[in-house]
Image (spheres, helix red, strand yellow):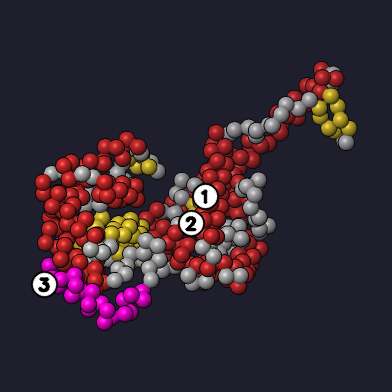
Amino acid sequence: MHLTVNPRPSPLEGKQTERLCPANWLKKCLPNEPSILHPVAQASLTAHYLLPVLSSLESCLLAVRHRLDNELERRQPVKLGKAYPLGQCLEIAEAVQQCLRTVAEADLPAESVVGLRALRAFQRAGGDFRQVWGDLRGEYFQNAYQVGTLYIDVANDTVNPAKPKVEILPFCEAQFVPIRDFQHFRKIARSYWQHEVYPNHILPALAPHCPLIHVSKNGIVKLHDATQYMLAMTRTQGFAPSERALREPPMPQALFEQLRQALQGAGHTMATSPEQGRTQGLQQCREQRAKRWALDSKRVTSVIQDANQINLHLASWRRRLFTQEPPAQSKIMSTIQIDNNTYELDSLSDDAKAQLQSIRFVDQELARLQAQVAAMQTARIAYLNALKAVLPVV
């Protein structure tokens, strides 16, 4: 914990000063944006309530983590192949904030109670306690808290478990910045998640809101990124960030064909080629901007639902590939149609039934081989991404 304690003005003095600086009040934050909305007032409240008891505040947060860790680990012992707490910064941060609202003073050590009382008094006086998300030091996507003018990470051990569980810094020293655009987002996703990222040239209607397709290093494909922050980032700029992402060269044909196969029957209109998807996606950006859809908040819920449904469909399709599930049949067939003639199966001769069984076997083998081809295409993308990661920089 590294902080410099400055002489503290009273909360009243801070608010009087801020009235002379109306620009501070005019600033608007995107959802979960790592930024201080009213810096003068928040600096005053932080100095008055929190800075004098920082060690007790840290003790309080550590005590809450201690209360929660066993239960959180029981709920999700592994996430994306990594043991708790790795990769679970959001889950831990949300649980800690909820616990801070409800925990009784009697359930905490005496020193922690001092920190809890100060934090609650700070909030009652108008202090901000916001969950924020963004780029931490150019290396990670980070979920943390902006508490007044402090950066507080209650899940500091979710990338490196050897680190302290709680980190408190002046917000201005944390090197925690908002994601500017989709190119910025892609840069962090490639280095932190080790994802390969492509423009969404498959689903034109969703491209203005979700212009990226991600392929993880083990071949998992997802539509990104239908979160409140990223949606607000492109919507507040009239989909201009999405246009920049979609103007890039067409997505690889192999990935496009894989997605078309995976999303058959999902109920979404798909482009017929990457080139067409690029053209239609850019056109959708212009059309949706002209229709002022970026200002229609109801569409955010619809987009999130559609993106989740698509990603569930992709996950289900991938599971079927690797388990080789047979296609579901809604009913048992009692007839067969050949050359526009319908035959009752029970009426066929034994020789005809044997030939029919052979045809069914061949159809099943074709389906299995097609699934294997799709799986190999996914694996090839993953291996190619791994190769790029170890090639020397030219």
Residue kind at label 3, given as amino acid type = Pro
Point out the stretch of residues depicted in magenta.
1-27
Q: Residues within 10 Å of mark 3 (few under 14, many from 20)?
A: few
Query: Which dot, 1 or 3, sits closer to the camera?
Result: 3
- Label 1 with label 3: CB-CB less than 8 Å: no
Q: Residue 5: name its quadrant.
A: bottom left
Q: Which residue is mark 2?
A: 226
Q: Is residue 182 left or right of residue 320?
A: left
Q: Which residue is mark 3?
A: 7
Residue 384 in the image: above or below residue 357:
below
> x, y percentage for residue 196?
47, 56
Q: Earlier in the sequence, mark 1 or mark 3?
A: 3
**Res. 308 mark:** 1
- The Cα atoms of the two marked residues, 2 and 3, are separated by 43 Å
> x, y percentage for residue 134?
36, 61
- Label 1 with label 2: CB-CB less than 8 Å: yes
Residue 283 in the image: above or below residue 205:
below
Q: State the SS at label 3.
A: loop
Q: Is residue 344 left or right of residue 137?
A: right
Residue 373 in the image: above or below residue 181:
above
Viewer can see residue 324: yes
Q: How many marks?
A: 3
Q: Earlier in the sequence, mark 2 or mark 3?
A: 3
Q: Earlier in the sequence, mark 1 or mark 2?
A: 2
**Residue depicted at 56% across the width and 49% down the height:** 310
Residue kind at label 1, given as amino acid type = Asn
**Residue depicted at 29% across the width and 71% down the height:** 38
| Nearer-the-camera pick, 226 or 47 | 47
> x, y percentage for residue 313?
57, 45
> x, y percentage for residue 13?
18, 75
- Label 2 with label 3: CB-CB less than 8 Å: no
